[in-house]
Image (cartoon, rainbow, N blue to C red):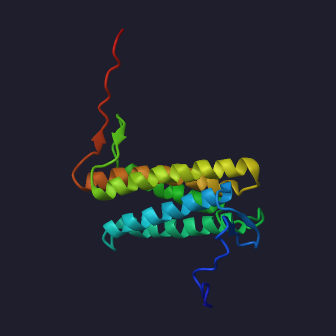
Amino acid sequence: MSNRLTRIYTRSGDKGTTGLANGSRVAKYHPRIEALGDVDELNCLLGCLLAELPADDSLSNMLLRVQNDLFDLGGELAVADPNYTVITIEVVEWLEAELDKLNESLPALKEFILPGGSRAAAQAHLARSVCRRAERRAVTLAEAETLNPQGVAYLNRLSDLLFVCARVLSRRDGGEGILWQPRRPKQS
């Protein structure tokens, strides 16, 4: 493999723009960059979650594949060409199959749960919430520009998968998760 980055700083972004993979430049607050940044942040959070898991954990291989998928999705966003698609319906279907397998082992959820339960479960919840933000940013971008709809679908399924991962991790640590204890509204 050739060297992809020979110099880390370029100074080309010092005036508030950033380069896309297609050679164009956009403002650092452009919706495409916001979506790309959230996908990158999500990938980082998955790295933190993976660091909490043993290497032979059954979730590790799946989450590592998700990290690679997110890098591919980030590539789609960076290339900014509607004809360049890596996230396909098959990738989304793989995610759905993984989600179904994990969810089969869990009891029905009768109450909302709060983020937490264990460090790893809390990190899965944090990744889920950032995934939802990345999805919102992708939807915003898709309203203005042509975007691969499978990328949006992937983020939508991934947030569900991360919720289920949090439940699995919580159960492993001996709990069901922390149940929401709602306050009752005051009667006037």
Find the residue positioned furthest to the bottom: 2
Of the pair 34 and 142, the residue shown nearer to us = 34
Asked if 135 appears above or below 184 in the picture, the reply is below
Of the pair 58 and 154, the residue shown nearer to us = 154
- Horizontal side, residue 40 vs residue 53: left or right: right
Find the residue positioned furthest to the left: 174
Asked if 58 appears above or below 101 in the picture, the reply is below
Give me the residue at 57% from left, 81% from top: 8
Find the residue positioned furthest to the top: 188
In x, y percent, where is residue 67? 50, 67
In x, y percent, where is residue 3? 60, 89
Residue 3 seen in this snapshot: yes
Of the pair 109 and 126, the residue shown nearer to us = 126
Asked if 144 appears above or below 92 in the picture, the reply is above
Residue 100 seen in this snapshot: no
Of the pair 61 and 20, the residue shown nearer to us = 20
Classify the position of the N terminus by image quarter. bottom right
In x, y percent, where is residue 65? 50, 69
In x, y percent, where is residue 104? 39, 50
Give me the residue at 67% from left, 58% from top: 32
Classify the position of the C terminus by image quarter. top left
Find the residue positioned furthest to the front: 15
